[in-house]
Amino acid sequence: MLWMTKKIDYAFLALHVLLNQEDEHVLRVTEISKVWNVPQKFLSKIMKDLVDAGIVKSKYGPGGGYVMGLKPGEVTFRRVIEAVEGPIYLLKCIKEDPGCEHYDTCPQINAWSDLQQDLVKLLESKTLEALIDIPLPVR
């Protein structure tokens, strides 16, 4: 079964919080984690990945925390997913020979490769603008 990992889920939840702050208000991980009740330590690692990808900016010192680094329309779902999980591959054999005895004659590789390309195009077409103005949960 294919499903979204917790890292991807939490990354989008954190970005949803940042996107819905007025005047680029800086938020600490503790504040972000409370909105969606996600583990702070895990979220800290995810935030670092988002900073490294340029999606989020970190501000240090008193009053420090995180703000969006790019405009919502500049950040695709693909970029977020790849920031926290790396390149998207539906099957390992699309990327490289996994040592399978059927690799050279496998009838599935081309079909899965086509599906992967379609998925990547779809994720590239959706931006974080989709998360703006969706109300935050009340806690």
Image (cartoon, helix red, strand yellow):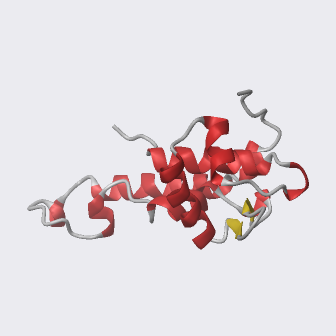
Residue furthest to the left? 101
Residue furthest to the front? 62
Residue at x 74% of width, y 44% of height: 130
Comparing 20 with 87, the one in front is 20
The x and y percentages for residue 88 are: 44, 60
Comparing 18 with 3, the one in front is 18
The x and y percentages for residue 9 are: 53, 44
Left or right of 77 on screen, residue 2: left
- Residue 17 position by quadrant: top right
The x and y percentages for residue 105 are: 16, 62
* Quadrant of the image containing the N terminus: top left
Q: Establish if 23 lies above or below 95.
A: above
Comparing 10 with 25, the one in front is 25
* Quadrant of the image containing the C terminus: top right
Q: Establish if 62 lies above or below 128.
A: below
Left or right of 80 on screen, residue 114: left
Residue at x 39% of width, y 59% of height: 89
The x and y percentages for residue 47 are: 59, 60
Comparing 32 with 63, the one in front is 63
Residue at x 56% of width, y 65% of height: 48
Residue at x 79% of width, y 58% of height: 26
Left or right of 108 on screen, residue 44: right
- Residue 44 position by quadrant: bottom right
Left or right of 80 on screen, residue 3: left
Residue furthest to the right? 23
Count the labels in the image. Answer: 0
